[in-house]
Structures are given as structure tokens and as C-alpha cells.
Image (cartoon, helix red, strand yellow):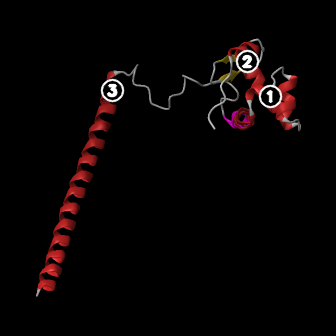
Amino acid sequence: MGNKYFTEEQQEELRANLYVEKVSEKSITYTTEFKKKFTEEYQIGKMPSQILREMGIEPSILGKKRKDSIVARTRKYSIRPEGFQSIRGTNTLRPTTKNLNDAEKLKRLEHKVEYLKQENEFLKKNIQLDRQAMWEYSRHHLKDTSSSKQ
């Protein structure tokens, strides 16, 4: 079974909700306030469907997978350092290379050169080991086949 897509009517209904930041036919993004309130309500023992109804969202529109996903995600949000704030587009996990001064650029390039040297050494050793293994294999294999012909 694939994703449950939202119809145009469902999208309009969800957009009208103050807890929905944006919605498309495939996805829904909730506000930070929604995430906090949902987590608080869930932690005091309310069921996800009940919480959603109280917040003006019909659970049947979302489906079981999305409901379960809300619970899992809000649990993760509550323990991460950023909290419930969205980090989309701000945290790519890649080090920034834009505003580096010359010393930082030089240090970065030196590190890259050192890394590539190590990688080349590793590859050379690998090639040598492969050749050695092939030589050993052919030596034993040829010896076995020539003795079986006699």
C-alpha cells in the first residue's frame, strides 16, 4: 500500500487549521505550537486521535501512518537540542566553506592533500595484495590441474 494522498478538499480543510503550517497532496507540516501542545497532551495520557480532534484535525484525514509518525517525531523533537523548532534548510551537516579566510582555506586544502595521499597509499597496497593473491591462486591452481592430468 502506498502513501495516502490528500484531496484538494482535505488540503483546504487542513490549511484552514491554525496548527498547520503548510500542506501539499503528499505532506503536512505542523506549527511549533502544535508540536509542543501535542507532546504535552500525549504525555498526560491522551490518545493521538483525541488530541488531533481537540486541535481541529480529523484523524481519518491523516491516516494511521501519519498519526503514528506524529507521535514518534514529537518524541524526538522533545529531546533534541533545537526542541520543536524546524531545522529544515539550516542544518545540512556539512561544514561551511563559504566565508573562509585564506588561512582556513589553506588548512582545509592541506588536510585534503594529506587525506588523498593516504587514500592513494591504501589503494596501492590493495592492488599489490590483489596481485599477490592472484599469483598465489594461479600457482596453486596450475599445480593442482597439472597433477590431475597425469
Amino acid carrying label 3: it is Lys
Front residue of 36/115: it is 36
Alpha-carbon distance for marks 1 and 2? 12 Å
The tag earlier along the polypeptide, 1 or 3, is 1
Residue 76 lies within the magenta run:
yes
Instruction: Say whether marks 1 and 2 touch (CB < 8 Å).
Output: no
Q: Write down the quadrant of residue 28 in the picture.
A: top right
Amino acid carrying label 1: it is Pro
Q: Which mark's residue is nearer the viewer, 3 or 2?
A: 2
Amino acid carrying label 2: it is Gln
Q: Write down the quadrant of residue 97 in the picture.
A: top left
Disc 3: CA contacts within 10 A as few (<14), some (14-19) or many (>=20): some
Q: Which mark's residue is nearer the viewer, 1 or 3?
A: 1
Residue at 74% over, 17% down: 14
**Residue identified by numbered label 2:** 10
The tag earlier along the polypeptide, 1 or 2, is 2
Quarter of the image with the N terminus is: top right
Residue at 89% over, 38% down: 45
Front residue of 106/44: it is 44
